[in-house]
Image: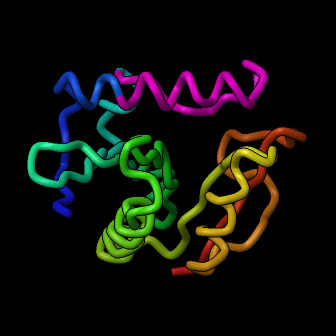
Amino acid sequence: MEIKVDDLTGSEVVSLIGEHLHGMTLHSPPESIHALGLEELRKPEITFWTVWNEEHLMGCGALKEIDPQHGELKSMRTATAHLRKGVAQAMLEHIIKEARKRGYTRLSLETGSMEAFFPARKLYEKYGFVYCPPFGDYIEDQNSVFMTMEL
């Protein structure tokens, strides 16, 4: 697997982000969807990476700077054809390493509270994320779960 910074212009990446956004609509009401679209992911405070196996896109993930000490994990997605191959784990490890390299003292995330998001929550727990109140601009929402970890 190769992880690299991506400019979000390739057709495979555009398709994966579309799949990600569509997946959110299947499990969350519109007011509870916090996934970012292509233009939002291109903002300067966000770094977006893709995971590749040769020419095959396996997944993606992003890191948003909330402030110089606090980052937010965004847009974690494994392509359907590559589920259960360690893609999410590799991306999560990459993002945690990058957050530490940047000097962040905290890394946080928002994910869904529904059963469909259970595997993601278990992965985050495995890496030391703990449940927390909403952070940044988020508000309490029964469809959202907030997690954070000290770096």
Q: Position of residue 46 (x, y in %)?
A: 35, 43
Residue at image coords 73%, 18%:
30
In the displayed structure, does residue 102 sit left or right of residue 28? left
Viewer-nearest residue: 16 or 145: 16
Magenta: main secondary structure equals helix
Residue at image coords 81%, 44%:
114
Q: Position of residue 89 (x, y in %)?
A: 43, 68
Q: Can you name the residue that lies furthest to the right here?
A: 142
Above or below, comparing residue 26 to residue 147 in the picture: above
Q: Is residue 37 magenta?
A: yes
In the displayed structure, does residue 92 sit left or right of residue 132? left
Q: Is residue 71 magenta?
A: no
User: What colour scheme does the image use?
Assistant: rainbow
Q: Position of residue 52 (x, y in %)?
A: 19, 51
Bounds of the magenta segment: 16-38
Residue at image coords 51%, 62%:
70
Q: Position of residue 78 (x, y in %)?
A: 42, 48
Q: Quadrant of residue 108?
A: bottom right
Above or below, comparing residue 100 to residue 59 in the picture: below
